[in-house]
Each structure stands twice: as structure tokens, then as C-alpha cells.
Image: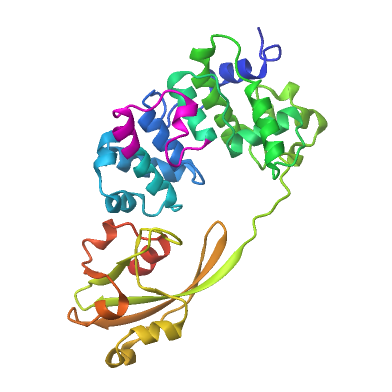
Amino acid sequence: MTASTMNFGDAVVAWQKKHGRHDLPWQNTKDPYRVWLSEIMLQQTQVATVRDYFARFTQRFPTVAALAAAHQDEVLGLWSGLGYYSRARNLHRAAQQVVALHGGEFPRSAEALQTLPGIGRSTAAAVASLCFGEPIAILDGNVKRVLTRYLGFDGDLASSRVEKELWALAQTMLPQRAVQSAMPHYTQGVMDLGATVCMSKKPQCVKCPVSQACVAHTEGQVARYPVKTKKLKRSAEQLWLLQLVTQEGHVWLTQRPQQGVWAGLYCLPVFDSFEALLAAVPSQFQAELTEGEAFKHVLTHKDLHLHPVMCTLGKDAPLSCLLGEGRWVDKKTWPDLGLPAPIRKLLLG
């Protein structure tokens, strides 16, 4: 049976075995902890970036039980720089639930995996298919692109109803031969196709195992898919950061609330205006304040315009009653804390 006569799923399996990626550190394992960890890290993040974080994370937390037993501050510290910190908080909570509710063993079905914090339909399907051979489709961003192009599916994925239609079609495209053993190859293969061949720009159709049956390729309309008309509404916010340091290099840090921007992370004191910042600083220190150069930090849904204000103080300065709970953190300690990327960048100078 040639690739041209195989169904989509079997063709992807055959291609993946020969041409797919096999050298990623979370591959060649059926350990659901490592597969799940990689899937969460890879959301909104490039493989090249995830490699180092994955290595550090698994070295410090080699098992789900080790992750569950950790303090959230340490988890966020290791995650610092990856962004989208709700992933780390949900990761920690999910590990705790696996230990507390499932005896330290991950549920073996996608349906049960979705009951854990931060695990959506596609991530649950990825773990269940890669680790346990469950015949269930995934539908992340790369896979949506592969399937819509192959099928010529021109429905608007901004509609939840249309996305459900694509989910249903995806389930019909799974391999049909030796299904349980084929599923890990299929799931990895369809992700590999999207990442290395059927890319959003300059797709390499000549290398694609299913190009002969691909509607978008046949019609010469590859760039048309996937269709998603709804654009994310962006907003902007101005924030002032009070960068207090001592002569010895200690930094005054507070912990952000568990909800909102940078939830749960350690941060410089944040204010909505320069006037609010000024009102929080004792009058005898206001003459020492120096405004730094403002810079922009881009979030998924919002642009943050950050205005650093610096001041060097003694460690006995009366800060806690004015700035809320916080503490001086020495320069050997703060780099290991969970810090927002722009704060880390600012402190490193």
C-alpha cells in the first residue's frame, strides 16, 4: 500500500516513522508526566525555548509527586521567563490532584484527563494517545492548519460551532491499521507535519505525504486556510514600577495577587500612575527618585507601557507600612524567584 492509497491517518503514521521528529527530549517515552509537561510548556511557546526549561524542570521535579510537593514559589521560579504563568499555576494544581485523587498515576483516558486543572481537550487527547494509544484526535493550532488545508475546510474557526465540526472530522481521520500502536505515531506525526512541513508561511508541500489528496495544494490556495476572521481585541495599560534597591544590591519585592496580571509572581511595587507611586514613598526619600526610560511589554491581549522609577535606600527604610507586604531580597536570591519577564530584564539592567 503506497502513501497515495492509504487513508490520511495511516499515511501520516508511515511518514512520521521515517521523517518525523524523534530527537525531542519528551519523545520516545510513554511517561504521561513528561508528555503532559511538554504539552503544557509548548502552548504558545517555541520548541527551541522549551528544551532548556523542560530539562531544568524534570531535573528538579523528576516525578509528578515531586512537583506536587513543591512550593508554588519554586514552581513559578523555574517557569520564570516562559510567560503565560497561569500554565505553571495550573500545572502545580494538576500535579497535586494527580497525587491526591489518583494515587500519583495519571488518568488513562482523555475524558478523565480533562478533569485536571489546565488540561483542555487537545492536551488531554495528546497525552491519552501518545501514552496510552487512545484513538482520539488532537486539534492544536498546527493541526488545525494541516487538516483545514487537507480537507479544504473553509469554515470560520472563530465560530465554536464550526470548530466542533472540525473536531468531528478530525476524529474520522485517525489511522485504521493497528490503531493502538499507531496512535502515538499519528499524534506525533500530525504535529510534526504542522511544525516542519505544513507551516503557516512557505509550506513545503513537496515533502508532504498527503499532498496529492490535499485540497488546498490541488487548488493552489494553501494560504487561504485556516479561516478565522475574529481578531483579538487588544488594549493598553500604563504602569509605574518602583525599583527600590540598597547599596548592597537588595531589591524590595512584593508578591502579586493570585488573580490578574502577573498573578502570584514576585514583582516590584506596581502603581497605576506616577502620582500614586509618589504618594506611597516617604517624603524624605522622594528627592532620590529617578525616572527611567519607559518601555513596552507585549502580552497576548494587552500592551503594557512600563515606567520604571528608581531609588537607592537603606535596608531600614520604613517601607512595609506604605507599600504593603514585601521584603528585601538579596541579589543571590531574587534571580531564582518567579518574576515577570520585564521585571527580570529591568533588574538585570
Residue 318 is left or right of residue 230, and the answer is left
Q: How many marks?
A: 0
Q: Quadrant of residue 301?
A: bottom right
Q: Residue furthest top?
A: 1
Residue 172 position (above or below residue 166): above
Residue 78 image offset from top left, x and y in percent: 32, 49
Residue 98 position (above or below residue 230): above
Give the residue displayed 41% in from the left and 31% down from the top. 35
Residue 322 image offset from top left, x and y in percent: 30, 80
Residue 123 image offset from top left, x and y in percent: 50, 34
Residue 207 is left or right of residue 111, and the answer is right
Q: Residue furthest front?
A: 101
Is 260 magenta? The answer is no
Residue 322 position (above or below residue 227): below
Residue 203 image offset from top left, x and y in percent: 67, 36
Residue 344 position (above or below residue 199): below
Asked whether 195 or 340 is in front, the reply is: 340
Give the residue displayed 58% in from the left and 34% down from the top. 196
Task: Answer yes or no: is residue 349 visible.
Answer: no
The C terminus sits in image quarter: bottom left
Task: Answer yes or no: is residue 193 visible.
Answer: yes
Magenta region: 96-120
The N terminus sits in image quarter: top right
Asked whether 190 or 153 is in front, the reply is: 153
Give the residue displayed 54% in from the left and 71% down from the top. 237
Asked whether 142 or 100 is in front, the reply is: 100
